[in-house]
Amino acid sequence: MLALPACATSSLEVAPTYAPQLGVDLTAMTRMPSGLYYQDLSAGDGEVAERGRTVRVLYNAYLPDGTRFDGTTDSPISFALGRGQVIAGWDEGIAGMRVGGRRRLVVPPRLGYGSEARADRIPANSTLVFDIQLVGVSEAPERVDPRAPRL
């Protein structure tokens, strides 16, 4: 009788390959327990982004193959951090940044759009790469910007 070990059929995420122009090096990034990776590209020296505060960011968003699917140029978007107004990867990954700072996020599907495709630009179960610059933090609640990546 041949005994075979049981094979787990867990839903392990396969790590994508990243286009060289994205500059993603997971070994140089900090991995959070949620699976989110981040890397501070520049620290900034202003106010800290904290849950419940309104943050203003400039960003570029990419698929792992280097395709840019969204972003801002010179007009920041605003939202209340930690209130579920944007994808979970942003709520977690922007917290702790300082105004003037730039951070790269690698967001796993479960903290992005999950199994839902977004129009023709974002396939289902996509890992997402964001380069984010924090340009402002305020106490006053603002309406979430309709351009912000959210569910």
Image: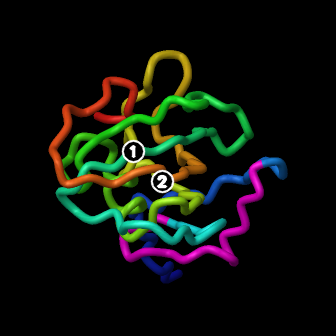
Q: Residue at x 47, y 50 (%)?
A: 135
Residue 61 forms part of the magenta stretch:
no
Relative to 11, say whether 60 is above or below.
above
Q: Is residue 32 within the magenta segment?
A: yes
Q: Amino acid at mark 2?
A: Leu
Give the extent of the magenta segment.
22-36
Look at label 1 and name its amino acid: Arg
Q: Mark 1 = which residue?
A: 56
Contact check, label 1 and label 2, Cβ < 8 Å: yes
In the rendered image of this protein, does residue 126 appear above or below residue 146? Answer: below
The structure residue drawn at horizontal position 34% and vertical position 63%, both measured from the top left corner, is: 49
Instruction: Give residue 115's position: percent from left, percent from top.
Output: 38, 37
Q: Quadrant of residue 89?
A: bottom left
Kindly identify the residue that appears in the image at 43 percent across and 27 percent down. 117
Picture quadrant where residue 40 is located: bottom right
Judged from the image, the secondary structure of the residue bearing numbered disc 1 is strand
